[in-house]
Image (spheres, helix red, strand yellow):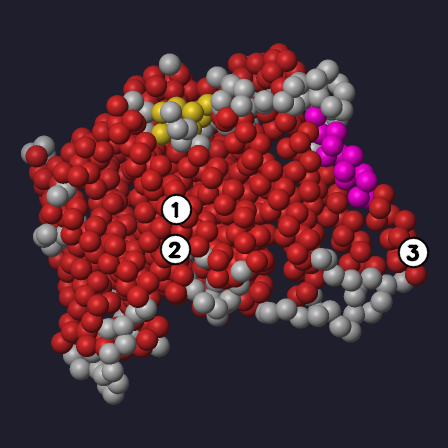
Amino acid sequence: MRATVGLILLAVIGVGVGISLLAIPFGAPKTEIGDYYIENAREDTGATNVVTSVVVGYRAFDTLGEVTVLFVAALGLGAVLATAGGKRGRSGVEPASLILSAGNIFLFPLILLFGAYIFTHGHLTPGGGFQGGAVIASAFLLVYLSSPGKRINESGATLTESVSGLVFVAIGLLGLTYGTHYFLANFLPKGTLNTLFSAGIIPVIYCAIGLKVGSELAGVVDNLMEETE
Amino acid sequence: MVSPVLLLAVPLGLALCVPLVGKVSRRAAGFVPVIATLLNLVLSIRLLPTVLEEPIVANLGGFPPPFAITLFAGPVGMLLSALIALAGLVVSLYALSYIKTGPTVRYHTLYMLLLVGATGVVLTGDVFNLFVFFEILCISSYALVAYVGDRAGIEASVKYLIQGALGSALLLIGIGLLYGLFGTLNMADIAARMGSADPVPVFVAMALIVVGLGVEAAIFPLNAWLPDAHSSAPSSISAILSGIAIQVGLYAVVRMVFTVFGASSMLLFFVFMGLLTLLIGELCAFAQSNIKRMLAYSSIGQIGLIIFAVAIATTDSVTGGLFQMVSHTLGKALLFLAVGYMVYRSGSMEISSLEGMGRRMPLTSFAFTIGAFSLVGLPPFVGFPSKLLIVRSALVGQEVLLQVLIGLVLLATVVEGAYFFRVIQAVYFKKGEGQEARQDAPPMALFSMFVFVVLIVVIGVYPNLITDVLESGASELLERANYIGSVLG
């Protein structure tokens, strides 16, 4: 009975969404707003990567919200695990093989460097703060796998998380006081197109996001590692 | 002019400071939410007279409306942001003495982010931005429901998480469809283009969005998570979830249906859904023996009443609906705060264990009684003018259908009265076992309860204090063209 009702409901939703999708002309160059972004993004924001100019320029406020969503999720996970289990050490875990631990020594700094490269060049090349942050967190995951005894410096992670978040908010508030007086307005000089030091506040925000996402995801890995025994 | 974005940016910045403050002193971390909500309350009240004349539209990033995110601070947004800040302030004062154990620093951070999410939802003028703030609100509530860390809390939180995540997914699909259809995310821009669109996809998008938001707004039959979540959360969080979170979800539904979709043909459906939610909520509340579950079901009932009033869609009825939101926030938050310490002292959530509380905790019991009287709608408390306005607005049109339905609403109020008086009878007129030693709630908790008590009485006696705001809020919701005009210029 429940399965039948479920199937019927699913069919209704499927047909409805299907009909609606037919009404949307995919791939057609149609929206005013999309055209506007492609035409004006470089001039407006100074970023060569149009995706970045939308994410950290036109819709930077959404990105501030998204960063907060990740912050809330990481924090919530920490709170739930802390109340449900309490802190436990990771004793009795077998040490990793020589290949893994030796490889880690070489790879860890390289991965960090690569992550930093991705978020510092977010306004020029594909990628950005979120992607760079995820790469950085993967370096910490590798450390956990190769040397089970090591732990992330919790105070350091909290500090990075909070300070980089505060930098994002502070840049927004500075935009409100300087220049055009809009929250998150690009008040820094936009520089020459296609160079590292261009696009005003965008690379600064992306660096803050990269560090924040990196430390948050590393914290999530750390929290979950405690529980897997 | 002060930008309404400060209502979001400043508390968000302070929320990020809480972990840093917590490193220095765990106790000091609890005061950060107090400061942030106080600032928001002052700022909201300062902006109210301005937005009554003309809504403030803030274009973030300095780009013109459809290309960037817009904040829309009208009377409704400011009223609700003031209400969120007020309830947030009082509950954070209460939490100073109530939240003692567990990861308190994380509690205060999550609590502040919950309020930031709620404020963002009521201020934004962009559908995707709405989704982002909605997620902040929901995810922080999932975590806070599980804060106590017992089995019931974790189970309730997981239930809430699954249903909420499903709702969010539907909401996102609906927003995606809207973007596909209109190529824009700005609410006013979508509303302006709504007339020229094919009705079937628009209906599908509306159905997905209403169902998605309806989970958080606890519209029947999407509210299965609510009684568990609101009863297992710490009482300070129950107060915020019942008083703020579901109403913010409801605001989002109303904003989408009234302003974005302008779906006047759907309103009768919402009148019936509201009535159904009201009746089911109140009848289930009557059947409960657990006090916090009873209050949770009563919240469902109240939400139903608000939906019913708003969906009648006359100036008076929407004013009544908004008024009911205010009176529900004040009344229900007060009840949860009072019950928090009653349950703490008696060690059980059963109504029978509250017997004799009138002697053991006289002031807390008194606060509980005021909250209950106000929710039932007795004069001279705030619930009376709000319910009276709803009833009057339904009768004034001389429509037979509404007159019949309002009879059912009054019946639900009688049921509401019955279960609240049962609790009051247990508190005052039955003798508890053993300990009669007087041991009231701590001074800070009592102070926060009495802030609500004073407001309930003052607004109940002088409803004119807020009716201006409520009326212009109602016309903001009913007059789409003005909304579109003030954003797009």
Query: Which residue is denoted by mark 3 in the rendering?
Result: A102
Quarter of image, res B251? top left
* Magenta residue span: A111-123
| Identity, as a three-letter code, of the amino acid under mark 2 | Ser
Quarter of the image for the C terminus of chain A: give it. Answer: bottom right
Point out which mark residue B217 bears: none
Pick the front one: B174 or A214: A214
- Identify which residue is drawn at 23% across, 83% down: B436
| Identity, as a three-letter code, of the amino acid under mark 1 | Thr
Query: Which residue is denoted by mark 2 in the rendering?
Result: B92
Q: Residue furthest bottom?
A: B434
Circle nearer the N terminus (1, 2): 1
- Identify which residue is drawn at 76% across, 48% down: A138
- The chain carrying label 3 is A
- Identify which residue is drawn at 54% across, 29% down: A174
Q: Is residue B479 visible?
A: no
* B360 on left or right of A142: left
* B344 on left or right of B183: left
Q: Is residue B299 visible?
A: yes
The percent coordinates of residue B53 (x first, y second) are 26, 23
Query: Which residue is denoted by mark 1 in the rendering?
Result: B37
The percent coordinates of residue B426 (x first, y second) are 18, 74
Q: Is there a contact, CB below 8 Å, between mark 1 and mark 2?
A: yes
The percent coordinates of residue A46 (x first, y second) are 66, 18
* B263 on left or right of A124: left
- Identify which residue is drawn at 57% across, 14% down: A36
- Crowd tier of the residue under label 3, counting other residues whose Cα lies within 10 Å: few below 14, some 14–19, many 20 or above: few
Q: CA distance from mark 1 to mark 2?
A: 8 Å
Q: CA distance from mark 1 to mark 3?
A: 51 Å
Q: CA distance from mark 2 to mark 3?
A: 50 Å
- Crowd tier of the residue under label 1, counting other residues whose Cα lies within 10 Å: few below 14, some 14–19, many 20 or above: many
Q: Secondary structure at mark 1?
A: helix
